[in-house]
Structures are given as structure tokens and as C-alpha cells.
Image (tube, helix red, strand yellow):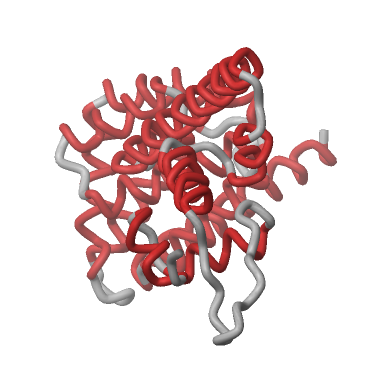
Amino acid sequence: MLTIGQLAAAAGVTVRTVRHYHHVGLLPEPERDASGYRRYGAQAAVDLIRIRTLADAGVPLARIDALLHAQPAQFAAAITDIDAELRRKIDQLAEYRRRIAELAGGERLVLPPEVVAILDRMRGLGVSERRVRLERDSWILMQALDPQVVPQRIRDKNAGLDDPETVRLYLACDQSFDWDPNDPRLDRLIDDLDAWETKHERDGDRAGYLKLVSARISEASPAWQRIVDALVHRAGQRAEQRRAAGRES
């Protein structure tokens, strides 16, 4: 007869594990003998080894009791089912691993390949990673709030990156990040950006996601905040002038 410690050692488990199997009903708990100890026979050792073997193989504890008492055909069928379930879990974990690996290039997880290609193209042109991240965020907001415009924006963005003047302004804005808001160089840059916006202005340019992007940019740099404020003000003036012209006509 074995004590609980000897039983656990024989099966290669801990005493705590044996007690847990008692608690869940997998292994019967014997009555105490006259000395106050619980004694286990050979059958308990065999059952515990079988339980441990099934548990180590990934069989859920809830299914082990039925397997311990199953006929050979039932046992084989149950093992086949458990194997199929484990395979499904393995496939699911593999998918989780794939998605986690994609997180290393965060934009690839949430943006279409065409947009990721634009971000990579910006990096290749010398745009800083800081500015690329803001660009990425704008695409994420656009996709969530105004998805129907994404295909046209992709075309527009690629066309812009084909244009030397647009690229020059991207790089100039990038360089202005750390400038003092009162730096006189900002005046020239604002004029250049305003001229570009006037040339490329389209209806709906102030969609909801663009307002959020503007707020995000303003938070990033006081110099950029001054640029955004100036451009919004000038765009508002032009809109008012158009409305006044319409009323006069």
C-alpha cells in the first residue's frame, strides 16, 4: 500500500496534482486507515499513470474519465475526435502566430497592400518615419470613416509622389517639424503649401477623417500646428469669397 506521496512519485506527478484529480473526480480518494493515513493500492497507481499519460497527451480532463472506462472501439473513436480537435487548435494557433508576426510591420495588419506600398515609397523618397507614421494613421482613419474614397486617394497619392513639387513640399514639411512656430521660413512654406492646395483643391477635402488627421498633426509639432491653422484659415477665406461671388451673380 502506498501513501499519497509514494503514489505521486510512482506516477511522476505532484501530491497537489493527485489531490486535484481527487477533487475533479478522476481518481477515487480512499478512506483513512486506523493510523489516519490514506493508503493507495496498485490499481490507484495504474489509474493515475493512465490519467497522467492522457493529460500529457493533451486530452482534456473532462474527457479522461470516460476514456478510462471506454471499450477499445470507443477509446479509439474518442482519441480520433480529440486528435482532430487538437489539430484545429494547432491551426488556430498558427493563424495567431501569423497575425502576430504581421504586427512587426503594423500597417500591413490594417491597411491594404496598395497603401503599404505608398508608405514604403515615402520612406524611399527620404520622408522620416515620424511623418510616415502620421500618414499611416491618416489612412487608417480614412479607411474606417470614409472607405469609399480610398481607391481614388491611392491614385491621387501615387500621382503626387510622381510630382517633384509635391515631394519637395513633403520633405520641407518634414524638416519643419522642430522649427519654432515664429520661424520666418514657415511663412514661405505656408505660401507654397497654400498654392499647392489651391491648385489641387477638391470638394470634400475637409472630410471627417481629415479633421482628425489635422488635429493629430497639430498635436505633433507647434510648427505644424501653425501651418495647419494658416492653411485652414486661408481655405475658409477662399470658400467665403466663392460664396460671396455666387450671391453676387
In the rendered image, residue 191, in percent from the top left (x then y), is placed at 36, 52
Relative to residue 118, is residue 34 drawn left or right?
right
In the rendered image, residue 154, in percent from the top left (x then y), is placed at 45, 23
Q: Tell me the quarter of the picture where residue 119 sits.
A: top left
Which residue is at the front of the view, 225 or 241? Answer: 225
| Viewport quadrant of the C terminus | top right
Q: Residue furthest bottom?
A: 35
Relative to residue 75, is residue 3 drawn left or right?
left
Which residue is at the front of the view, 16 or 176? Answer: 16
In the rendered image, residue 124, in percent from the top left (x then y), is placed at 16, 32
Q: Residue furthest front?
A: 34
Q: Residue at x 25, y 31 (%)?
A: 120
* Residue 23 shows in the view: yes
Above or below: residue 248 compared with residue 173: above
Above or below: residue 168 compared with residue 39: above
Q: Tell me the quarter of the picture where residue 147 sits.
A: top right
Q: Residue at x 76, y 43 (%)?
A: 243
